[in-house]
Image: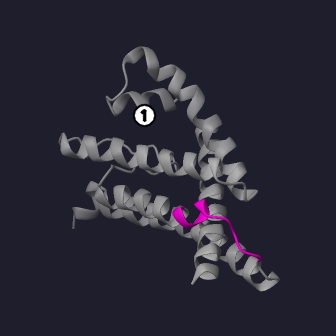
């Protein structure tokens, strides 16, 4: 059981690390839009929106790189906190009746309103990282290969899930 949790934790570390790396790059590519996305959540005072827009992509890149490099426990704790912060920001806005706002999750060409599936996705990713908080027992090459394959699967499933959820949530999906 301990070995299985270690493999799951490493897979999650790689998968979430890749997700954060790609998200950080995407935010840098569209850095002119990021302050508006952050401001639209209406959680920060206006004076903190620009600094947050500068720091967020850098934080995602640093944390993502550390996770892919299998560093722990600090990068794992930071990734869990970041994912839960994103989930909380979405949940607060959904509770306020503001589920129409764009999540800012990446794929800027695909507008994606926030919703409970996105909150659940971020909480699930955070929970998958929890086993990585404990020391990893010695792993065989097969265990490491399994963790790498699992991490790649998580990273590949993420944009697919996001795209499908965005299409389902889009108003055009309800027009027939």
Q: Secondary structure at mark 1?
A: helix
Residue 1 placement: quadrant: bottom right
How many numbered circles are shown?
1
Q: Residue at x 42, y 34 (%)?
A: 37
In the picture shown, does residue 150 fall above or below 135? below
Query: In this view of the protein, which residue sits in the foreground, 127 or 54?
Result: 127
- x and y percent of residue 27 in the render? 58, 39
Task: State the residue at coordinates (51%, 52%).
Answer: 80
**Which residue is labeled 1 in the image?**
37
Question: How is the structure coloured here?
Answer: one colour
Q: Quadrant of residue 38?
A: top left
Indicate the position of residue 160 as horizontal and vertical percent values: 50, 67
Rendered location of residue 109, percent (x, y): 50, 48
Q: Is residue 35 visible?
A: yes
Tell me the quarter of the image containing the C terminus: bottom left
The residue positioned 46% from the left and 63% from the top of the image is 127
Q: Specify few, some or many for label 1: CA neighbours under 10 Å numbering under 14, 14-19, or 20 or more.
A: some
Q: Which one is nearer the viewer's eye here, 11 or 163?
A: 11
Residue 168 is one of the magenta-drawn residues: no
In this view, which residue lies farthest toward the right? 141
Residue for point 76% across, 56% down: 69
In the picture, measured across the screen, residue 129 lies left or right of residue 119, that is right
Report x, y in % for residue 136: 69, 69
As for residue 136 lying within the magenta part, the answer is: yes
Identify the image quadrant of residue 93.
top left
* Left/right of residue 12 with respect to residue 101 in the rendered view: right
Q: Which residues are magenta?
A: 130-138
Q: Look at the image and tell me whether residue 109 can be seen.
A: no
């Amino acid at each position: 059981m301990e070995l299985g949790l270690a493999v799951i934790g490493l897979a999650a570390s790689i998968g979430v690390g890749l997700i954060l790396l790609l998200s950080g790059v995407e935010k840098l590519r569209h850095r002119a839009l990021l302050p508006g996305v952050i401001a639209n959540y209406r959680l920060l005072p206006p004076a903190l929106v620009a600094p947050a827009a500068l720091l967020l992509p850098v934080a995602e890149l640093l944390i993502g790189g550390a996770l892919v490099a299998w560093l722990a426990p600090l990068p794992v704790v930071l990734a869990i906190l970041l994912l839960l912060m994103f989930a909380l920001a979405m949940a607060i806005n959904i509770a306020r009746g503001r589920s129409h706002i764009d999540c800012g999750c990446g794929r800027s060409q695909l507008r994606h309103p926030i919703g409970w599936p996105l909150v659940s996705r971020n909480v699930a990713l955070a929970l998958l990282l929890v086993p990585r908080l404990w020391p990893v027992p010695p792993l065989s090459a097969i265990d490491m290969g399994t963790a790498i394959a699992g991490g790649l699967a998580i990273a590949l499933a993420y944009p697919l899930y996001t795209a499908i959820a965005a299409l389902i949530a889009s108003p055009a999906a309800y027009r027939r």
